[in-house]
Amino acid sequence: TEEIAQKPVQSDYEQNVITLPLIYAFKNLNDLKLKAKDHRLTRAEINEAVQKTGGLRFTRLIAEKYYQKSLELISELNVTEEKATRLKMILDKSNRLI
């Protein structure tokens, strides 16, 4: 939602920003790429394609993978416990957005 993201949602494509859910949909639906090349892709079609291909689920899995990797890396840093805690707080905040 816009409240969680603190920005307009589902407007990236119109702003020429291609996000991971849409990249995943493009990878799995060749006809979607053709429509995009011809500038005939609507927001409704994007939403349907992302839902059909599981683009959001895929994106959440990727985000979770990097979240876990980041936790591992933080634990390996040679920093104070206070700094590690602050880094984890930042990481947790970004993870809540997904």
Image (spheres, rainbow, N blue to C red):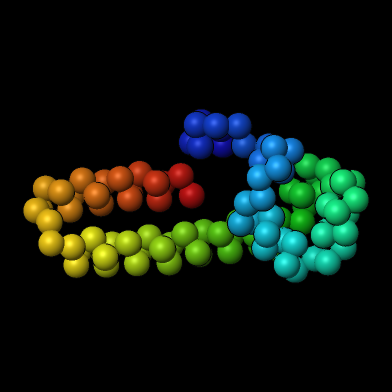
Residue 51 visible in image = no
Q: Quadrant of residue 29?
A: bottom right
Q: How many marks?
A: 0
Q: Quadrant of residue 79?
A: bottom left
**11 relative to 88, above or below:** above
Percent position (x, y) of residue 20?
Answer: 61, 56
Image check: 98 left or right of 18? left
Percent position (x, y) of residue 55?
Answer: 65, 59
**49 relative to 86, above or below:** below
**11 relative to 35, above or below:** above
Residue lying at 56% horizontally and 59% vertically, measured from the top left: 59
Q: Quadrant of residue 50?
A: bottom right
Residue 46 visible in image = yes
Residue lying at 13% horizontally and 62% vertically, measured from the top left: 78
Residue lying at 83% horizontally and 58% vertically, measured from the top left: 32
Image check: 71 left or right of 16? left
